[in-house]
Image: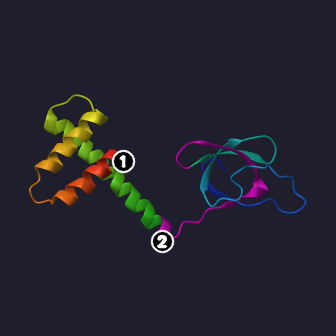
Amino acid sequence: MVGKKVKLIETTCGKTSSNNAYLKCQDVFIIVSKYGENAWIINHLSGGGAGWVYEWEMEGYVLGIKELEQELTETKTKLESIQSKINWINETGSTEFSEDEFKVYQTLKLLDDSKLSMIEKSKLIAELIKK
């Protein structure tokens, strides 16, 4: 069961509940390790701890085309971000990555792009600030 992706369901009548705060949410979790008899420690997919639950409070998570396409889009975005950081290191001759310097560099490149309108530049710079 370790490594399996699950969703949490409410405890069925007559069963003991873990009272996990995530029982009513639609998030997907990953099973990390055994926690006593019939119980498991779970984490959020992002890695943060989410407590423990009983086996009867979990159901298997099935991936459909929608979920796979979303995961692909997120992965492509992450890869593009990593590639742009590598490009920054190569272009600047840096030996290590600096998030602040990278953001400033991206901002300056946007300001230098004559193809973009002032509004487009403003929106793109606002997105950089949010990251």
Q: Residues within 10 Å of mark 2 (few under 14, many from 20)?
A: few
Identified at 44% across, 64% down, the residue is: 70
Note whether 121 is above or below 32 in the view shown: below
Identified at 74% across, 49% down, the residue is: 20
Q: CA distance from mark 2 to mark 1?
A: 30 Å
Query: How was this image coloured?
Result: rainbow
Q: The magenta stretch spans which residues?
A: 45-67
Residue annotated with mark 2:
65
Note whether 7 is above or below 84 in the view shown: below
Looking at the rendering, which quadrant does residue 7 occupy?
bottom right
Are discs 2 and 1 less than 8 Å apart at CB? no
SS at badge 1:
helix
Which kind of residue does numbered mark 2 sit on?
A: Ile
Question: Residue 53 magenta-drawn?
Answer: yes
Note whether 102 is above or below 123 in the view shown: above
Question: Residue 18 magenta-drawn?
Answer: no
Q: Where in the figure is residue 13, as x and y percent of width and height?
A: 88, 63
Q: Where in the figure is residue 53, as x and y percent of width and height?
A: 74, 49
Residue 131 visible somewhere in the drawing:
no
Identified at 82% across, 44% down, the residue is: 37
For residue 44, side relative to residue 92 (left or right): right
Residue lying farthest bottom? 65
For residue 65, side relative to residue 120 (left or right): right
Instruction: Specify the label residue 130 is tagged with.
Output: 1
